[in-house]
Image: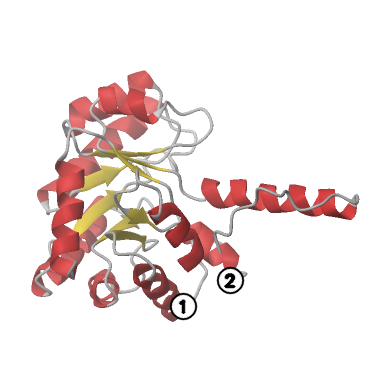
Amino acid sequence: MTTHDKAAALAALYGSSTILRLVNVWDAVSARTVAALPETTAIATAGHSIAASHGFADGAMPFELVITSLAEIVAATELPVTADLDDGYADPGETVRRAIGVGAVGANVEDRLRPIDESVDRVRQIVAAARSEGVDFQLNARTDAIARGGDRPLEQSIADAIERGRAYLAEGAAAVFVPGILDREATERLVAGLGVGVLSVIGIPGALTAAEYEQLGVTRISYGPLPQRVALRALRDLASELYADGVIPSDTPALN
């Protein structure tokens, strides 16, 4: 598929009444492994996991390495790839142009609770840059209204998320990502405030299932750094078994 075809495919997935399930990847081999599953319709990168795989803290990886890593993942699959681009870096428009240049057709970009006018302007820059590239780029605009809400009441954080999310959608974002543990009531309030089919959530311990979120009108669920943590736990556990005179399981698939 061309970049335009991939962008159209990702747009259709966001527009579907079926929730888009994305198991986040961090390198070429994890991307190929997930992409090989028949249920996989798109690939999402996990910025935290990519940074960790290169020895950096989340958000601290050099930008050029971010783009290089993204290019390697895009090259590993024919599926649409949506990238975790942290906060968009110094110039969010240029960041998205670079991402499109290596084949990404969507992205998460977080607001980090900047003043709302500044956050809206950064979304505007992203959308304008994508349009200038002629790509129907699917921006999953992330608001940290809950994740960085601190001690303020949850009701206030939800109201902030709705205000910011509406503003991002008005500027052309495809969806609004509200990370945090969202129970049924919080999810219903966010969907009521933002609309059906635009809320994006993260599947972390304590969250609802993908099917439950789908019933509530959520458009997308992803899992952030959790898939890599599960993989690393498996590696750690295997290493412990091997140090204890264990053996490699005979049914180990040659996924690499």
Closer-to-camera residue (122/95): 95
Secondary element at tag 2: loop
Disc 1 marks a residue whose amino acid type is: Leu
Q: Are marks 2 and 1 in contact (CB under 8 Å)?
A: yes
Quarter of the C terminus within the rendering: bottom right
* First along the sequence among labels 2 and 1: 2
Residue at (32% x, 55% y) in the render: 108
Which quadrant holds residue 155? top left
Quarter of the N terminus within the rendering: bottom left
Reply above or below: 128 against 230.
Answer: below
Q: Residues within 10 Å of mark 2 (few under 14, many from 20)?
A: few
Most distant residue in the bottom direction: 64
Reply above or below: 159 against 212.
Answer: below
Most distant residue in the front direction: 250
Residue that carries the numbered disc 2 in the rendered image: 54
Residue at (54% x, 46% y) in the render: 226
Residue that carries the numbered disc 1 in the rendered image: 65
* Residue 248 locus on image (x, y percent): 76, 53
Q: Which mark is residue 153?
A: none
